[in-house]
Amino acid sequence: MKKTLLLLFIGLFSFALSGYSQSYDVETYYKGIESYNDLHLTSEQIAKIQKLKREKGPRFAAIGRDRSLSGYEKGRRKRELALKYREEMHAILSEGQRTAWENRYGKFSPDYSMKDTISDDYEARLDALERKYDADKDAIEDNPSLSKEERKAKEKALKNAYKAEKERLKAQKKAAKNQF
């Protein structure tokens, strides 16, 4: 009986301690940029940042909950929103604060993010093209009404069309990225 009570007491004590330490970590985690002392933010800047976070947070969540969007489309929209958030944060901060923020979060470059978005878009197109090619090729191979020569001819034509479209997409991707 004494051992049971002792174990129960130790268990409750350790549970209480772990709860206290987790609540402290969660509080500091969710405070965000306005809690960083190294940025030396003014009260006006903190208010602007908090307002910006209140505006953008629900929009991020809405994109995540939208079941009509594919995973790729959700990611693309969230990247666009994050880019706008960084641009607005950049406008709120002074030059010295921007430097400290970039040291913490990485260098801000809207061109780099745009290149990533363009690259992701063309990669998705190339993946879709490859899936369509594989499906069409399987359909030709599984068609029992075609002779061996007809199958080869159709597969060769399909492969040539696939390669031409793939090269066209790669050229478009390169041209689009070179604009930035």
Image: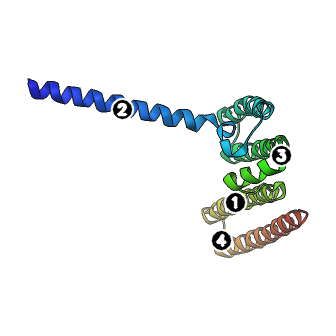
Which mark, residue 147? 4
Of mark 4 and mark 1, the one earlier in the sequence is: 1
Q: How crowded is mark 2: few (under 14 residues within 10 Å), some or many (20 or more)?
A: few
What residue is pinned by disc 2?
17
Q: Residues within 10 Å of mark 4 (few under 14, many from 20)?
A: few
The residue shown at (91%, 63%) is 179
Inspect the image, locate mark 1, and give the three-letter code of the amino acid beneath it.
Answer: Asp
Of mark 3 and mark 4, the one earlier in the sequence is: 3
**Residue nearest the observer in this picture, 150 or 22:** 22
What residue is pinned by disc 1?
127
Q: How crowded is mark 1: few (under 14 residues within 10 Å), some or many (20 or more)?
A: few
Inspect the image, locate mark 3, and give the three-letter code of the amino acid beneath it.
Answer: Ser
The residue shown at (75%, 38%) is 41
Q: Are marks 4 and 1 in contact (CB under 8 Å)?
A: no
The residue shown at (78%, 68%) is 166
What distance separates the C-alpha of mark 2 from that of mark 1? 50 Å
The residue lying furthest to the left in this view is 1
What distance separates the C-alpha of mark 2 from that of mark 3? 41 Å
